[in-house]
Image (tube, rainbow, N blue to C red):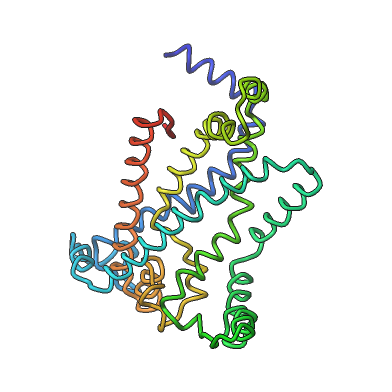
Amino acid sequence: MKEKRDNAFKLFKRDWQLYSLLLLPIIYMVIFKYGPMFGNIIAFRRFMPGGSILGEKWVGLYYFKMILSDPTFFNVLTNTLVLAALSLIICFPAPIIFALLLNELRSKRFKKFVQTASYLPHFFSVVVVAGMVLELVSINGAINNLVEFFSGDRINFIQLPEWFRTIYIGTEMWQSLGWGAILYLAALAGINEELYEAAKIDGANRWKQTIHITIPGILPTIVVLLILNIGNFLEVGFEKILLLYNPLTYETADVIATYVYRIGLQSSNFSYATAMGLFESIIGLILVFSANYISKRVTDNSLW
């Protein structure tokens, strides 16, 4: 044990300049990630604005009982689960399919153009994207002009609850498709070309090569990203939803994050909002461990 400590000290002394680069990220993590965790204590204490930062009175599980008796919470939980499930089912596999299609392109110039065009939406801020969407789906927007051109009636998309999920998933797909494909393209580049040559000799066509070589080759990457996505299952795009929704669409658009925002910051019920956020985080943690365990048993690939 002493020998290991001595070796570690020698390595640190030799490469202290490199280790010093970790200082700022560590400080950032402590201040902005670990520090705020102490604030979760007010989920178990009654917090009064202007009083103690750790709450005035211990109330135990009072706010968690409020969550279970709050009918609005179950509505926003349902909306969160539906949007998260749609994102996982539609938006997660889309970059994989897109990367596989890009990998089949033979024209390098066209491939680079498609990649650049698909990456670009990722760099637009959420505010810009929301503004573009609101203009497109407005009653006098381009989409309604197109609907009217084909003899349809204009639809006030942004005020109809049944259209909100389609709008949200559509914008998520548009923004994440190209950027999400980057990791899969990198994984595809690491597959040994000799495997494809051997498959061609055995008479395998492109489809069989994809099924038996390409997909197994990127499967570890898919599994890791799937586990990470499941961990953030309930954390659907808060900023985008906040900018796109309105009281008329709360029925399908209101999610846990926006409800916590209204309860905590707008209604100043900080303890209840903290309890709800903690409840969401615990569910996310359980999902990560469950997904990792299942993946390890089924595919032998996992995060740890």
Asked if 49 appears above or below 189 in the picture, the reply is below
Q: State the image coordinates of residue 200 (x, y, percent, origin top left).
A: 65, 24
Relative to 233, is 217 on the left or the right? right
> Which quarter of the figure is the N terminus placed in?
top left
Residue shown at the point (67%, 40%) measured from the top left? 103
Q: Residue furthest front?
A: 203
Q: Position of residue 90 (x, y in %)?
A: 48, 55
Q: Nearer the viewer, residue 96 or 289?
A: 96
In which image quadrant can residue 235 be found? bottom left
Q: Is residue 39 left or right of residue 98?
A: left
Image coordinates for residue 113, horizontal then vertical, percent = 77, 52
Is 83 placed above or below 253 here?
above
Question: 67 or 59, which lies in front?
Answer: 67
Number of labels in the image equals 0
* Image position, residue 92 (x, y; %): 50, 51
The quarter of the rendered structure image containing the C terminus is top left
Left or right of 256 in this view: 171: right
Q: Residue extending furthest right?
A: 109
Q: Nearer the viewer, residue 228 or 226?
A: 226
Q: Residue at coordinates 63% horizontally, 75% vertically from top-left?
A: 132
